[in-house]
Image (cartoon, rainbow, N blue to C red):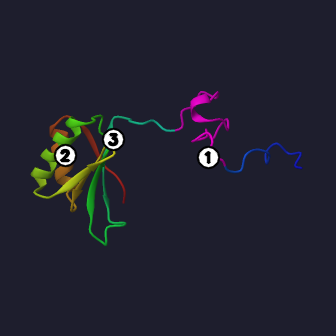
Amino acid sequence: MLNNKKFAGIVYSTDHGTICPACNRPKDKCSCGKKSVQKNDGVVRIERHTKGRKGKGVSIITGLPLDGDELKKLGKTLKQKCGTGGTIKDGIIEVQGDHRDTLKLELEKLGYKAKLAGG
């Protein structure tokens, strides 16, 4: 047995879900008071991804404070402005092609604080 507390504890478990890195307790029973990641910081990020799409690029919009029908309406409007297709998955809007500059301008016109993210 190890006497050092640094190395004692659960190595892997799926019983509790996500574990807080600071206090090593389940997130819903976290006692340290630290929140590791904020869900929304008020900035809409626009990225370009090609991984898993056979080299085809898509513009991905994250951080929108919308859900449901509002997100679908915004996604449809943005896709029409770019003249391409796309999808909405898990609160993320994907627009086919590299349209980051156009998307940033349109989101800023709508009052969002938009930022180009990634390399």
Q: Which residues are magenta?
A: 13-36
Q: Residues within 10 Å of mark 1 (few under 14, many from 20)?
A: few
Q: Which residue is mark 1?
A: 14
Identify the residue at the far bottom of this view: 54
Q: Residues within 10 Å of mark 2 (few under 14, many from 20)?
A: many
- Give the number of the mark in front: 3 or 1: 1
In the rendered image, residue 24, in percent from the top left (x then y), is placed at 67, 38
For label 3, the residue is 63
Q: As shown in the figure, which amino acid type bears the numbered disc 3?
A: Gly
User: Callout 1: helix, strand or loop?
Assistant: loop
Whether residue 53 is in magenta: the answer is: no
Residue occupying the point 23% across, 52% down: 87
Q: Residue furthest front?
A: 15
Residue at 10 percent across and 51 percent down: it is 80
- Rounded to the nearest angstrom, the CA distance separating label 3 from label 1 is 28 Å
Taking the spot 22% from the left edge, 61% from the top edge, the residue there is 98
Q: Is residue 12 above or below residue 57?
A: above
Nearer the observer, 12 or 113:
12
